Image (cartoon, rainbow, N blue to C red):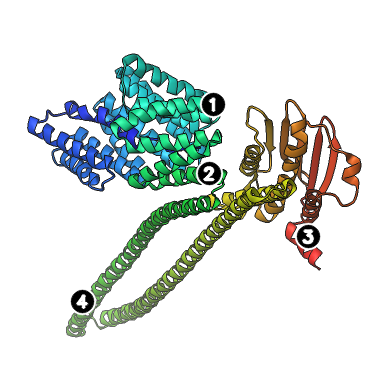
């Protein structure tokens, strides 16, 4: 991609200056003229500071938002949210930017404010487009395209030519990122025809010329037509002093002249583009411009300057990757802290509830014991009174008195036995409560120990995962530098066989570099997605040998998507050798070249199939001992992973490598070492 982000920053201003300017007219409550003028003044200052890359733009966006909240004006609030989202997107915090826009969208929908809804949809499209550029995820680009098409449909209902042309341009940019080049070209031309018919010369017209020029370069390779478009765009942008658009046009002119092998012109435009990139102070834009300058100086033979630009670009790429990782770590830490606080609060509430229950039961039992003591006292008093009465009446009814006395004594003994039983029950209850408290404390301590151990294990696992990804990242960067050095060294050689050997070595290094790049770009650090890896490797070799999707038919069939990294490394080198052999010896000798790669799971293991429709392989030469380095490398690596290599000539050459599943790679390596 010549310039993935294009002029998206200036396009945001073109989009939102239109839909946002009349927002005040759509308020649920009419605004006083002084308030409307004040808000428009803040918005104008926000645009000016943002055009110059000043952090002060955030201050005015915040003032618009705070005013809408304080005065209960929802559309002014949504306007402030949108401005804040754009400022935050410029700082590459795409997640927060998308969240702010999603907060503004329902406000406009409740007010049925179509211009605002269209503007937010376009803003979300640009945010997810930038996010897809940073993370290299196709699904995010498809999500951006969905929002862009929604914004286009709404602006077509409104009938504003400038807004419709802007929407077509953004749809075309995202289609181009998805490699749907014909759809992108149709979108650009639709927007261009609208503006030319209306005789409107604005930033969108210049941008459409520039984007059509990009398609003329890649994939059309119509460099003269691209230069015509770019000069039209550059004239419009220089007249309006749009620095970001000027830088983008200069960078594309550099690429067009480089493809035409007019290296002096390419270097001239590359150096001028670098001056504008440093003024704009956008790391993503500077990274792209350094890449163009590196290619121009490299092709012109200025290897020292080319290496300097390559190293500068690597530093910027690493800094952008570290910033994304830091944001992810901070967000995960916040989520973990919130969950831990919630769990602690839940445990504390359960503990308090249990303690309150125990206290209530003890209080109830204590009340019952006091009542029993009072009853015993009353009974004792009654007994004494009865004895006194019996003594007085002893002379009257001695027999009755004796009988009554014995009966009362029996009652007293029964009450004493009951009292002793209750005392023993109280003692047992106290012991049970103490045991319960002890067991509760023990269980609480064990729970804390288990939770601490689990947290420590999770933390160590996360650190190990991050270290592995950083290791793969550094290996990928080192391999990229080695590849660059091999390319620079090969350009100094005059011997074609030596240059060819250097290029083959560079391709092997690139095959391993792609593999390590896949490792650090995914969450899994021990497995490789072979579908993505095979696609990336074939695209890299197509570019190296001058093939495109129009000149080469490629078929890829992968059933086993993920394999272990220990198997993937020799696997990738074998695949690189087979593909390189096809590109060098088979495909150039056929009018309609076709290449197919398949990786299938069988009951007894994996099968790799690489086939072409070339003239076929000399089987006598293949079965002869020795041979080329590539042949020996395939044999050695196949033996390393326990694979069996077979070759067939049937409408071309077909290589089959079968890898048994019942013998792990590590076991085979240990056996060979023994």
In terms of sequence position, does the residue under pointer 2 or pointer 1 come before the other? 1
Q: CA distance from mark 2 to mark 4?
A: 109 Å
Q: Which residue: 8% across, 30% down?
A: 33
Q: Is residue 211 left or right of residue 510?
A: left
At numbered mark 1, what does the secondary structure look like: helix, strand or loop?
loop
Q: Which residue: 69% across, 32% down?
A: 555
Per the image, the residue denoted by label 4 is 378
Question: Mark 3 and 1 residues: CB-CB less than 8 Å, in contact?
Answer: no
Query: Which x, y percent locates residue 180?
Result: 53, 28
In terms of sequence position, does the residue under pointer 3 or pointer 1 come before the other? 1
Q: CA distance from mark 3 to mark 2?
A: 44 Å
Per the image, the residue denoted by label 3 is 668
* Above/below status of 329 relative to 645: below
Instruction: Name the mark on residue 295.
Output: 2
Q: Which residue: 62% across, 38% down?
A: 543
Per the image, the residue denoted by label 1 is 222
Residue sitting nearer the eye, 374 or 253:
253
Q: CA distance from mark 1 to mark 4?
A: 116 Å
């Amino acid at each position: 991609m010549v310039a993935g982000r294009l002029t998206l920053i200036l396009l945001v201003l073109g989009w939102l200056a239109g839909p946002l300017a009349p927002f005040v007219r759509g308020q649920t409550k009419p605004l006083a003229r002084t308030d409307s003028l004040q808000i428009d003044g803040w918005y104008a200052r926000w645009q000016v500071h943002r055009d110059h890359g000043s952090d002060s733009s955030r201050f005015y966006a915040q003032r618009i938002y705070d005013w809408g909240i304080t005065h209960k004006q929802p559309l002014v609030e949504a306007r402030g949210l949108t401005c804040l989202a754009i400022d935050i997107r410029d700082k590459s915090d795409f997640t927060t930017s998308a969240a702010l826009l999603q907060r503004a969208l329902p406000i406009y929908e409740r007010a049925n404010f179509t211009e605002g809804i269209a503007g937010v949809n376009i803003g979300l499209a640009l945010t997810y487009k930038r996010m897809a550029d940073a993370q290299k995820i196709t699904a995010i680009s498809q999500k951006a395209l969905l929002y862009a098409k929604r914004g286009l449909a709404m602006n077509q209902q409104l009938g504003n030519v400038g807004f419709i042309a802007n929407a077509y341009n953004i749809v075309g940019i995202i289609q181009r990122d998805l490699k749907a080049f014909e759809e992108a070209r149709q979108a650009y031309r639709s927007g261009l025809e609208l503006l030319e018919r209306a005789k409107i010369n604005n930033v969108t017209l210049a941008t459409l010329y520039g984007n059509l020029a990009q398609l003329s370069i890649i994939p059309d390779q119509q460099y003269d037509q691209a230069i015509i478009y770019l000069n039209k765009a550059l004239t419009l942008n220089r007249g309006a002093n749009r620095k970001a658009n000027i830088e983008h046009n200069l960078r594309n002119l550099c690429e067009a002249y480089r493809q035409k092998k007019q290296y002096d012109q390419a270097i001239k435009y590359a150096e001028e583009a670098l001056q504008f990139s440093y003024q704009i102070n956008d790391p993503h834009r500077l990274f792209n411009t350094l890449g163009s300058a590196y290619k121009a100086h490299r092709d012109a033979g200025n290897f020292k300057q080319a290496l300097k630009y390559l190293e500068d670009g690597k530093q910027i790429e690493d800094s952008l990757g570290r910033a994304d990782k830091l944001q992810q770590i901070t967000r995960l830490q916040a989520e973990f802290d919130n969950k831990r606080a919630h769990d602690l609060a839940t445990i504390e509430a359960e503990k308090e509830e249990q303690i309150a229950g125990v206290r209530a039961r003890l209080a109830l039992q204590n009340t019952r014991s006091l009542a029993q003591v009072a009853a015993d006292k009353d009974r004792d008093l009654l007994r004494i009174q009865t004895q006194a009465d019996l003594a007085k009446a002893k002379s009257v009814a001695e027999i009755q008195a004796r009988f009554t006395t014995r009966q009362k004594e029996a009652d007293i003994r029964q009450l004493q036995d009951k009292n002793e039983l209750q005392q023993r029950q109280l003692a047992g209850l106290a012991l049970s409560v103490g045991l319960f408290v002890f067991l509760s404390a023990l269980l609480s301590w064990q729970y804390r120990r288990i939770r601490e151990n689990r947290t420590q294990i999770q933390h160590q696992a996360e650190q190990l995962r991050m270290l592995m990804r950083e290791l793969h990242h550094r290996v990928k960067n080192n391999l990229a530098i080695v590849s660059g050095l091999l390319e620079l060294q090969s350009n100094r050689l005059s011997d074609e066989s030596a240059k060819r050997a250097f290029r083959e070595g560079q391709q092997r290094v690139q095959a391993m570099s792609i593999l390590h790049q896949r490792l650090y770009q995914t969450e899994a650090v021990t497995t490789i997605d072979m579908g993505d890896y095979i696609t990336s490797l074939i695209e890299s070799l197509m570019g190296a040998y001058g093939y495109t999707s129009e000149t080469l038919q490629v078929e890829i069939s992968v059933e086993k998507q993920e394999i272990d990294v220990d198997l993937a490394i020799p696997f990738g080198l074998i695949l690189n050798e087979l593909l390189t052999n096809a590109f060098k010896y088979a495909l150039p000798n056929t009018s309609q070249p076709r290449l197919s790669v398949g990786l299938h799971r069988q009951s007894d293991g994996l099968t790799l199939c690489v086939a072409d429709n070339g003239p076929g392989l000399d089987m006598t030469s293949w079965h002869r001992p020795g041979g080329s380095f590539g042949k020996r490398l395939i044999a050695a690596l196949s033996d390393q992973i326990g694979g069996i290599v077979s070759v067939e000539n049937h409408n071309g050459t077909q290589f089959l490598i079968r890898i048994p599943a019942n013998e792990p790679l590590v076991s085979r390596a240990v056996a060979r070492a023994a």
